[in-house]
Every structure is written in structure tokens, then in C-alpha cells.
Amino acid sequence: MRLDRRDFLKATASTAAALSFVTGKGYAEKRNGMPYRRLGKTEEMVSLLCLGGFHIGREQQPEKESIAIMRTAVDEGVNFFDNAWKYNDGLSEERMGKALKDGYRDKVYLMTKATAPRDAESTRKQLEDSLRRLDVDMIDLWQVHEVVGQTEPYAIYNEGVIEVMLKAREEGKVRHIGFTGHRFPDIHNEMIDRGFDWQTVQMPLNVMDHHFRSFEREILPKAIEKDIGVIAMKSLGGTPGQFTAKANLATPAECLRYAMSLPVSTVVSGMDTMEYLKQNLETAKNFSPMSDEERSELLARTKKIAMNGEFEPYKTEWS
């Protein structure tokens, strides 16, 4: 299956924009073999690969192994850690706090997130919980998590959530502020258009997203224009790798490279074994942007099965 001329031209233009970002202002020299990119207006330099916080806190995952994975990632050049207040009822944050002992905290740009309900008291309490669990005095990036409901942007702007975040920044408890979401691009549009100066935004970016309810097409250009640092997630279509495991039309390495070839600052990946970590480290350290031909072929290969959202359940099923 081939892309039609219009899709090919769009893909080519996107590749050119991404290449300009990857090799231009978004890029810095490698550190320990790992490419680093600028996280938008924060001016922080972060590793192209970000360690996802959900997987390392699952009960079936031995704590010792989780800590070893996190510390190995840092030793290999990963400096961006993702987490959230709700992940595994706090176990993800607790384990990450343990991994950041012995000098590792100073090597990591640490991010966590506050989830619903969208009110000042709940948001403030979640911050205090996260600081305690992570056992830190300050979080580098605090994001409003899973903004997926149509009424949530209004609540976030009008029920004290932003005020709590700004107060936390003023008090030195957080450094930067952003938001995440995975269901509707128009909600991301509203979160940005309501006017707060978000420093980062996290969204699903993958070969399926390009075709269906696309954050890549609708939100990514706006974020780049406003110099909002873009954090890509769900490069495999969500746990446990929807289209790599089920559709078998693209390899994990291809999917990760596709996301890394976009004008993003970093790509979050859940890695619950040393094997997965090593595979992703290899992809990141050997990264080169996809060519027009590679990108177009991969998009053509996945277009047909992407159109109804079956392989992106977070857009159609998940809360």
C-alpha cells in the first residue's frame, strides 16, 4: 500500500520540519552516547529517551530490579524520569525515590504529575504526597495528568489548579509546569488556547496517531510554534504495545525511531526489564532521523489498520 500524493507531500513536509528541529535548535551534542535535546522554553537539555515511571512500580516487578533498571538508565545517559501520583498507588514514586539515592537525584530531570479531581485542595495534597514518596524537596517538572474530559480545561483554569502550581513554583517545590493527555487533540488545543504559559506538553505520538485523531498533525506544530517542550508517549500504542504485539506491522525499534524523528524533546518508554532498556538505549544512541522514504513507507504500511483507533485504545476506550 502506498500513500497518496497529498499524504506523501504532508509526510515529506513533516520530515523536513522534524529534521530541522533535530539537527538545529533542538539538538545538542551527545552525552555518554545519548542524544540530548532542548526541552522547549525550559531551556533544559534532556535525554532523547525518557524512562517511564508506570512499569517500574508494578507489584509483580521486583523492587530490586526496578531500582537497577533506573540506575543503569542514568549510568547510560538517560537523565529524564517520568512518573505520576497515581501510578501503582504511589509505589512507582516510592521506588523512584529509592533509586535516586546515592547521588542519582543530581543526575536526573525529575517529572511527576497530578491527576483528577481538578481542585486546589486535591492538587496541593498530591504534590505533598509526591514530594514525600520521591523523598525530594523539589520536582523539576510537575504536570497536570490525563486531561481527557471535555470539561477539564475549564476546571483546571477556574478551580484553583493553576494557582496551586504557580504557588508551588514560587515556593521552590517545582521548577516547570506542563500538562498531559491522550484522548482528544481539541482538549490540548483548548488547554493551550486558554492562555496559560505551559512549559511542556505530553501527548501520544506514533505511526498510528499520524492517521487517527492525530496529535502529530493538530498539536505538535502549535507546540513547536509556542516553544512548548514536547514529550512524546505511547510510541508502541500503549501497554502492552498494541500495534507491535497485535498487528505485527512494525518493530518496537521502528516505532521508537519514528517518534524520535519528530520534533520532540524526548520520548517516554516503559522499560520493565534490562533487555528492554538495552534495546531502547541502542535505538536512542544509534539514532538517525528517518528519511522521507522510510517515513512514508512506514506510514503506508500502517495506514489501513490505524483508521478506526483500534490500536490506540487510550483514544477510544481508556479513561
Image: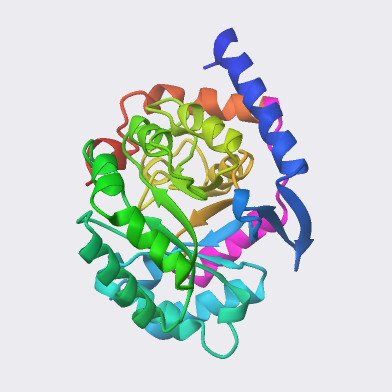
Q: Would residue 61 be found to the left or right of residue 260 on screen?
A: left
Image: 59 above or below 278: below
Queried whether the magenta region covers residue 287, the answer comes back as yes
Q: Main secondary structure of the magenta part?
A: helix
Query: Is any part of residue 53 visible from this angle?
Result: no
Quadrant in the picture for residue 95: bottom left
Q: Which residues are magenta?
A: 272-292
Q: Residue at the spot x=25%, y=35% of the render?
A: 316
Q: Would residue 30 be found to the left or right of residue 11 on screen?
A: right
Quadrant in the picture for residue 117: bottom left
Residue 164, percent across and down? 33, 62
Q: Residue at the spot x=35%, y=30% of the render?
A: 186
Residue 256, percent across and down? 56, 47
In front of the other: 278 or 24:
24
Quadrant in the picture for residue 73: bottom right
Queried whether the magenta region covers residue 74, the answer comes back as no
In front of the other: 276 or 116:
116
Image: 132 above or below 314: below
Query: Is any part of residue 9 visible from this angle?
Result: yes
In front of the other: 53 or 295:
53
Residue 34, percent across and down? 71, 61
Image: 126 above or below 311: below
How many numbered tags mark residues here?
Answer: 0
Image: 110 above or below 304: below
